[in-house]
Image (spheres, coloured by chain):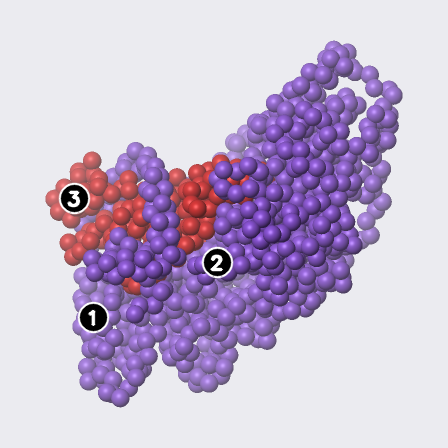
Chain colours: A purple, B red
Amino acid sequence: MRRHAEYQNWVAVYDSLSLSQRQELNEHLQTCQGCASDLVAYRQMDADIRSLRDERAAARVRVRFTEMVAAHAAPQAPGPRGSIPREPVIVQPRRVRQPWTPRQLLAPAAALILFVAAIWLGMRVPDRPGRVVEPAAVVPPASTTITEITFQCERITDWGALSTVISDFEVENPDVKVEFVPVDVLGTDEASYNAAVKQAAETADVFCAMPSPTHLQTGAARDLTPFIADDASFRLDDFYPGLLHAWDEVGGAVLTVPTYFDLGLIAYKPAAFDAADLSYPQPGWTWDEFLAVAVQLTQRQGDEVIRWGYTEVGTGVINRRLMSAWSSDWQAGPDYATLAEVLAWYETLYARTGAAPAPITLDWEPGKTYSGVDLDPYRNGNKSAMWDATWWAEAETDHLTSYPESRPGEPQMPMRTLSGLVLSGQTAHPDAGWRWISYLSQHLPDGEHIPARRSLAEAASFWSKLDGANTAVFRYALDHLAAFPGKLPSDYMAQMEAVVAVVKGEKTAEQALADLAAQGHVRGAPEAPATEQTTIVTMSTATPEAGATVIAFACWQERLPLYAPAVEAFEAANPGVHVQLKALEDLGVTPEAASMRPGAIEAAAAQVDTLCGDSLLTLIRTGAAERVLRDLSPFIAFDASFDQADFYPGVLEMLQSDAQTWGIPRGLLLQLIYYNQYLFDQAGISYPVPGWTWDDFLRTAKALTQTQADGSTRWGFTESWPSQFGLLRAQDARFLQGGTAGLAAPETQAAAQWYLDLVKVHQVMPIPAIYAEPAQSSGSGSAANPWSTTAMFSGFANGVAPDSQVLAARIGVAPFPAGTNSRTTPLEQSIDALAMSAATQHPEESWRWLAVASRAVGYSERWVPARRSRFEANASLTGVDPAVHSVYRYALEHLAPPLDAGGAAIQALREAIRAAMMDEMPVDEALRAAAGQ
Amino acid sequence: MITQAMEGDGTALLVSQLFDHYSDAIFAYLYRLVDNRETAEELVQETFLRAFKARSQLNAIENRRAWLYRVATNVAFDALRRGRRFTWLPWSQADELHAPRPDVADAARERDSVERALAALPLDYRAALLLYVYYGLTVHEVAGALGIREGAAKMRIRRAREMFRKAYGPHEDGVGGGLP
């Protein structure tokens, strides 16, 4: 009898099954509803995937390919002895192995074939004395039990050489066979990378990755220190300093044996230096010398730059200048004076002297692929006198020097480690796995990168590609490597954001430093001087200038029509004042840019008098509001017609900081609880009504949690992305008051424990997707169809059509339950609001327009009006069921206070909950740890 | 045509034929892996350049289509690996700040739900699912193209299906998706 999992695999590849397999599976499908429904779903899926339209390559692809072929079409000649081909040797993957036929018998033949093939291709065959294998030695004793381990790695690209290493290892270890799987562990963000590591740990005994303590804690990786201690052949001092990293966070555990690394270097054009009568840069030079040289080497013709002094093609200098201000062990960041020097240095290079263009990589955004930069204009053209050379392979053609230093002589040279060898935490053969790791680390194939072991690096072939000057640079850099910390300190990240703002010209160095000091991200900052009070504008003297006054108002294109009637009414009531509607998109702001780059919305604000949008909270939290927007408090104070009580409780306060008001709320994203009425009816449970309690909620969720016929669970409640903190916040809205420090408050711990108990103790809720499978819950913001797996779930107001035919269910809606704290309706961290640009020359007219606009618009999409008057207006309630309307009203009257926390606190909370949810540590401990961050 | 550059070189002509037959399909495959037209164009050129450089071995390759997909997959993974150099850039905190922004989610929602669900899959799995379902490779060929064993290929296809299914459900507003 086959295992069920095998049938599940068969279902996934039904069309590839043999006839007999298909018959057997068909019989299984008669009795297994789960597999049968999977097959139906897969067929539907396949049809949908096959309906995708194929994009076609542009014609230029063929043209370029033709050109490339022409350039390479010369007959293949043997390369120079000692050179290494850039392309990996193409070796057919090893297929199914015969488990009881010792592959060692084939090793000599395979090696011979590879040897001949390599000679034929003109490759260098590494000298490996002692690697001739005696056939007699490869036959394991009859009594030996063969342990087969799987090695998953694509980092070692020379598969031919690796195959030889495997054969040699198996000769020396006849009780172990290594099955090589050339697959890399890849991820586009931390979450997907963690998922890939987990996957590798499940399928391989040894794999190549860059693990962190998280992977030890989740059982994906194993601590190697006991193996290292017992292995006399494994010499620790053979590694370059800092490469074999012991993680203090997990008791000094070693999680990976490093394989290779790359050096960061600066490339330069000698001719540029010669023409300017400058000495070539030498190892040990300083950042000030770099700056002076870059300025002198910049060539201009009028306003146009003919050649940049320096160009950042990777992330070298933008990284290293700041890094070099930190202590070598990353324990101490720069003091205020040093950081001021660093920021001024960036400002001089990029903004003041224009000796370097804005780095290309600053246009990079999460989720986008960066495919490298064409270096030809730098190497063979005159685009720049210097650039950052990240890949050591460039040493073959470029003139190189080491990075400048702030403390000459200290180990500060940048390096980039590549995937190391990891022993799976789930392997059943740890000893065999370690023997393979130890052996491979001492016999790594010569390749495109620098071996982490000094003994291998000294014997590697790359030295032969370096001329005398570059050899000296390499020697210097290798002797001054800066070990990279396992995790960047939080102040570093905040400081890096400041650097980016300065480099992009969004802030002066002075502003950036002041902001860092205000946020507590620099030590030794002087006391902040008292800020000047905003000038109060008196409303009574408002007199339009002669001729028409134009108020420019920017908003998302799709929302502009909502304001058109208000414009008409405003202009009729304000002769001589016109409102000009502009789309934010036309001002260079996309929704993504507004989300990811506060600078984008800042730039747009500078071009208009007034604007609306949902990024105001971002501007407030990042401190940009004071610079970009006008404080509306004086206008509100002087405008008797502006009724603050018309706003739902706490809403206006969301846009206030330090007694200043940066916007007028327009729309809110309200969270509610949706439920499947059919399931309630079936279970004989009353529908939830406004005012229901948390006890009611838990009792209901328990009653509705059921194991279904196919063995899966239908949960009582599911908390959907992105409202992952809805329940937590609703439990006690005081949590997170005070920022990160508030995480350790007893209220926060109680709320978090209650939240975790829903999963761990009461088992009425699955682990929220953001913690269980973050790779799929981030980005799109989507949730899978909740109704197939849950009876209740949280969602946005207006987000679920109550009469949805798609869901084939009657959907009810309820507010969040009440407890000792009745203000439990969670608000998302966005608020659609109206604001006045600091750049406006018409503040009084702008205010009048904003006041009118804030009353003009009712429901739109998922946004519920922030004003009571607009909510109650019949015209805005088209299509909303009266019963639903009353739920909305209750929810609006019981809004939870806004979070008094920035992104760092939210991230820390999320990490703490995740750690507790995944049983890595108790919740109170996780929260205390998070509070200490 | 490419043939001019390959005159007198039989294996080079073979590469030309491969280009004629498969360049569009390989481009489409790469486009779905890297989600960027220009990058995909660069990668399809790199794929066939590698094929061209390895042309002397083409006659020994049993299944050239699967082999081409393997080269293309490696090329794509290499490119993405290079891209990882920049993942430290300090947008992550901003990402956390703004993750719940609904209008971004709305924008994503407008994208075709199948494309979106595919994009949600880790690269290894997206490649396996595309090769098997969309490009019609057999399990044996998928294994060859990805450089893994057949058993691993089956497992990968199955997991890719499960991931896709999860990502492809209707949204909470009932928009998109097509599975029960």
Residue closest to the eye, A340 or A528: A528
Residue A140 in percent (x, y) is at: 25, 84
Q: Are marks 2 and 1 in contact (CB under 8 Å)?
A: no
Q: How many marks?
A: 3
How many C-alpha atoms fall within 10 Å of the one at disc 3: few (<14), some, or many (≥20)? some
The answer for which chain carries disc 1 is A
How far, Cα to Cα, is label 2 from label 1?
54 Å
For label 2, the residue is: A708
Residue A815 in percent (x, y) is at: 68, 45
The reply, left or right, for residue A653 in relation to residue A39 is right
Q: Are marks 3 and 2 in contact (CB under 8 Å)?
A: no
For label 1, the residue is: A110
Which residue is painted at 41% across and 77% down in the image? A428
Residue B5 in percent (x, y) is at: 19, 40
Choose top left, top right, bottom left or bottom right for residue A64: top left
Residue closest to the eye, A73 or A665: A665
Residue A165 visible from this viewpoint: no
For label 3, the residue is: B13
Which residue is painted at 44% across and 46% down in the image? B180
Which residue is painted at 58% across and 27% down in the image? A557
Which amino acid does the dot numbered 1 rest on? Ala
Are both tags, 3 and 2, on one chain?
no
Are both tags, 2 and 1, on one chain?
yes
How many C-alpha atoms fall within 10 Å of the one at disc 1: few (<14), some, or many (≥20)? some
Which amino acid does the dot numbered 2 rest on? Gln
Residue B173 visible from this viewpoint: yes
Question: Which label's residue is closer to the chain start, 2 or 1?
Answer: 1
Judged from the image, the secondary structure of the residue bearing numbered disc 2 is: loop
Residue A374 in percent (x, y) is at: 41, 44
Choose top left, top right, bottom left or bottom right for residue A892: top right
Judged from the image, the secondary structure of the residue bearing numbered disc 3 is: helix
